[in-house]
Image: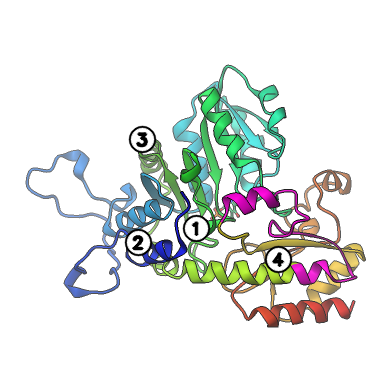
Amino acid sequence: MTKSRSSIDTQLIHAGEIRPGIEGAVALPIFQSANFESAEGEDYHDIKYMRLSNSPNHQVLAAKLAKLESAEAALVTASGMAAITTIFHSLLSTGDHVIFQDCLYGGTYDYARREFARHGLTCDFVDGERPDTWAGQLRPETRMIYVEAITNPLVGVADLEAVVAFADEHGLISVIDNTFASPVNFRPAEIGFDLSVHSGTKYLNGHSDIVCGAVIGRADLVGDVKHMLSYLGGSLDAHACFLLHRGLKTLGVRVRQQNASALELARALEANAEVARVNYPGLPSNSGHDRAAKLFDGFGGMLSFELLGGAEAARRFAEAVTIPIVAPSLGGVESLVTLPATTSHAGLTKEERQEVGVADGLIRVSVGIEGTEDLVEDFGAALAAL
Ligand SMILES: *Cc1c(COP(=O)(O)O)cnc(C)c1O
């Protein structure tokens, strides 16, 4: 079932492309046109308009992304959050209930906690690694189960096969945020997920220069999301389409370099005396390791580690490393570090943070495509200077 890597690399370059190229152009030009001429015999539903996500730039991206995840259809959106919220608003109705994994991306979590009720939606949260507990949250009105391929910042991997089986058994729509894995490492449709969603801002584009999103999966569901997106307006601008398209072509080489460097770095950190623990799905010490080894083609470029010296040591480490930039977000070509206790999880109390496993000395790393040895050396030097 798993595709060979050469196949995804070829798809990244050629899938969905218009050939022969328009006027011979090797790269798809930017169709900077809000509206398009009507053709003979077309009716109102055939109108091409940028908000309807049907310009050539949108359509080529949709075809390519669907191919990359072995799915029926895809759609690009103005951001990852536009993709996520439009999924909720197109596939859920007043009274519906959603089962969420308990450690979600902050924007998704806040939206579910703060905004769902206003739309008559309810939700509960479950531990993604404990399928035996999920049925306890099931209600007659449960309509969707929503998880993430790799969680932030502890990089856990839920029992993803159990999610699909649970959704099938109970007639739920299964949705997975596949941002952290990327299609190079995991293609959710291949194990039966109905929909995969991405913050394309991260690995898909990979260059930290645009915000975009994607919905990939069953054609009927992607069609419903696309229809709602045309009302809500979260369509991707043509120039951002072009940049995403350009970035995507190198996804394979980028992600494999990131996979390799993250694994080396995780091993080096695990062997370092200053480090209390390392979270990385590629390490046998990780609770999701067996699942990741079975389902993923690579363990990803995200890792986190905890310093024995706590918050102060983490702060000094972030100051001492020279290659990574201290910045939020992830998935770009440059390595980034963040301190979750003072950034993404700063809104929680110390006790709440402890409960979700975010120690004050935790450092999250998005590994870039710099030289592996340079990164290992830089991290080692910063730890030695603590
Ligand atoms: C960044 C991110 C999002 C939100 O995407 P935007 O492009 O910032 O809207 C959603 N899910 C995950 C896992 C993310 O990392």
Left or right: residue 348 versus residue 173 is right
Quadrant where the C terminus is found in the figure:
bottom right
Q: Disc 4 and disc 2: Cα gap in Å?
A: 31 Å
Residue type, label 1: Gly
Q: Looking at the rendering, which quadrant does residue 136 occupy?
A: top right
Q: Which mark is residue 365?
A: 4
Question: Type of residue at label 4?
Answer: Val
Q: Which residues are magenta?
A: 267-296
Circle 2 crowding by C-alpha within 10 Å: few under 14, some 14–19, many from 20: many
- Secondary-structure class at tag 4: strand
The residue positioned 87% from the left and 79% from the top of the image is 384
Q: Residue at x 58, y 39 (%)?
A: 161
Mark 1 CB near ligand 1 (8 Å cut): yes
- Secondary structure of residue under mark 3: helix
- Residue 359 position, x and y percent, is 85, 55
Task: From the image, tell me which residue sits under label 2.
Answer: 238
Label 2 secondary element: helix
**Earlier-in-chain disc, 3 versus 2:** 3
Residue 220 numbered mark, or none: 3
- Camera-near label (3 vs 2) is 3
Instruction: Relative to 69, say whether 128 is above or below.
Output: above
Residue 114 position by quadrant: top right
- SS at badge 1: loop
